[in-house]
Image: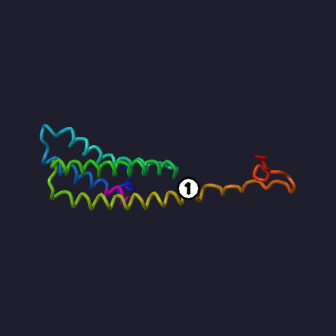
Amino acid sequence: MSSGLRELRVWQEAVGLAGDVVRAFRSNVRRETKAVSDHVMLTALAIGSHIADGFARSAASEQKESYLAAKRALFRLESELAVARHAELMPSGALPDIAARSAQVARLLTGYLVYLDRQIAEREPPAAPPPIPPAGSATRDSVRVPA
């Protein structure tokens, strides 16, 4: 792993978020809820993986797709955590820290996506204006159709 990825703040926060989620669920895993717990933990792990994948991409558009996948995984995680909280599958004391870190990851991801959108817009040539019809020629808008 390159040291550049380790210095990436959004990746650090995503790894910390996954660690918090795993710790919260590891302490409270019961046989009857193991499938749910495993799924939530895998979703948390996917966020950092998508960010690492985006970091490894060279084109801004490819990076954007990976960061969008990370953001989708983050939204899935928030939904799964809400279900787990509602079903009392996780300690209630862990939720505020996880929610705060999740919000930080969301802010950082949004910032990266805005940055990538700007890079993509700068690299795209400006759109050509529509051609101007010669004077006196009929256009579709100027032709009257009898009723």
| Render colour scheme | rainbow
Nearer the observer, 79 or 99: 79
Element type at marker 1?
A: helix
44 horizontally vs 60: left or right: left
Kindly give the residue lying farthest to the right in the view shown.
Answer: 136
State the predominant SS element of the stretch in magenta. helix
Who's the residue at 38% across and 52% down the image? 71
Q: Can residue 106 be seen in the rendering of this structure?
A: yes
Nearer the observer, 68 or 79: 79
Q: Position of residue 38 (x, y in %)?
A: 22, 41
Q: Where is residue 133 in the image (x, y as percent from the top left)?
A: 81, 54
**Amino acid under disc 1:** Ile
Q: Give the range drawn in magenta.
A: 7-13
Residue 95 image-quadrant placement: bottom left
Q: Quick check: is 147 in the magenta stretch?
A: no
126 horizontally vs 25: left or right: right
